[in-house]
Image (tube, rainbow, N blue to C red):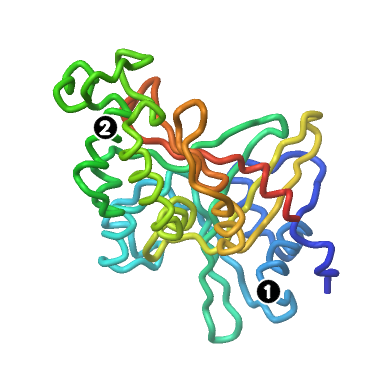
Amino acid sequence: MIDRTELGSQTAKGGFDNEHNIVRKFNNWKKDKTAQKWLDIMGYKLDTLDSVVAIQVPTKISQKDIEKYNVTIEEYNEFVKFKKSDAQVKLIIKIGNIIKIENLSLKKANSNADYNQIDKRTVDSYKEMWKFDDEIAFWLKLFTGEILPKDAKKLIGNIKPRENRRLFLDEFPERIQSKIVNFFERNKILVISDLLKGRGGLSANWMLVTMRNVDKESTSWILKDINITMNFYGYGKVFITPRGSLHIGRITMQRKGGTPDPTKLQFKFKPCELFEIA
């Protein structure tokens, strides 16, 4: 048995930060030492495993293909609604007559990288998910630029925006700022869970972050239970930043900008920060 005190974060020669490579490593688990460490972290004793089958889960799945991923119609509808932007690996692990299924959320970054996008949607999509009211939705649409300040002059009063195409959160009336902060503070657990774990049959049980080192000759990785991951990134206050975005623990909410989808809400985090809890 591998010493579990040494597990959680490792560095390996070469690169395997591609989703296909990670699937290949799991499927070669009998010989691949890194895959064996991952399985041990997940609580599986190698000498009790009969088989491990890993498949890459695409961000879009047709209804006719759902049986391939052991997902019911109900779970499929949930997946379509709460699908994640990153790829996942689905592990089908057989121990005797018992089949265990583990879903991994994969994040990759260079060692000098900053933020990665976790999720982006329209304000109305998040309104449906998290049930904030019309007033919050209206101001968040001003934040993303879905509603232009010039088209809402009667409702925003004498606010003079820093940009013509949007408002920043710190430009909102103090009452609205407090209302938005209070909403995300009260609903932090739901928000963090939806952003990192997802819902339904393909929600993530684990997060695997692979970090390609600057020398490009080695890859560091960390594998953490999704609940530990959520606690880590959710830790901290909810507050409006000096630049007019929102921090929810270690996660940032901002306007997407750029192309495509310039007026969507975007949530970002720093995947390399997970190495801090190794």
Give SS at disc 1. Answer: loop
Mark closer to the observer (2, 1):
2
- Real-space Cα separation, disc 2 to disc 1, in angstroms: 44 Å
Quarter of the figure with the N terminus: bottom right
Q: Hey, which residue is sitting farthest bottom in the picture?
A: 97
Q: Residues within 10 Å of mark 1 (few under 14, many from 20)?
A: few
Quadrant where the C terminus sits is bottom right
Residue 26 at x, y = what percent?
A: 64, 59
User: Which quadrant would residue 122 be assigned to in this image?
Assistant: top left
Is 111 situated left or right of 254 in this image? right
- On residue 43, the disc is 1
Q: Secondary structure at mark 2?
A: helix
- Which residue type carries mark 1? Gly
* Residue 142 vertical position relative to residue 269 in the rendered view, above or below: above
Residue 248 as seen in the image, left or right of residue 276: left
Determine which quarter of the picture holds residue 147: top left
Residue 108 placement (x, y as % from top left): 61, 41
Residue pointed to by mark 2: 141
User: How many numbered dots are placed on residues in this image?
Assistant: 2
The percent position of residue 245, horizontal first and vertical second, equals: 45, 32
At a point 75% along the width and 45% down the height, the residue shown is 220
Marked residue nearer the N-terminal end (2 or 1): 1
Q: Residue at x 20, y 16 (%)?
A: 150
- The type of residue carrying mark 2 is Lys
Mark 2 closeness class: few <14, some 14–19, many ≥20 residues within 10 Å? many
Residue 230: horizontal and vertical position, in percent?
55, 57
Q: Which mark is residue 70?
A: none
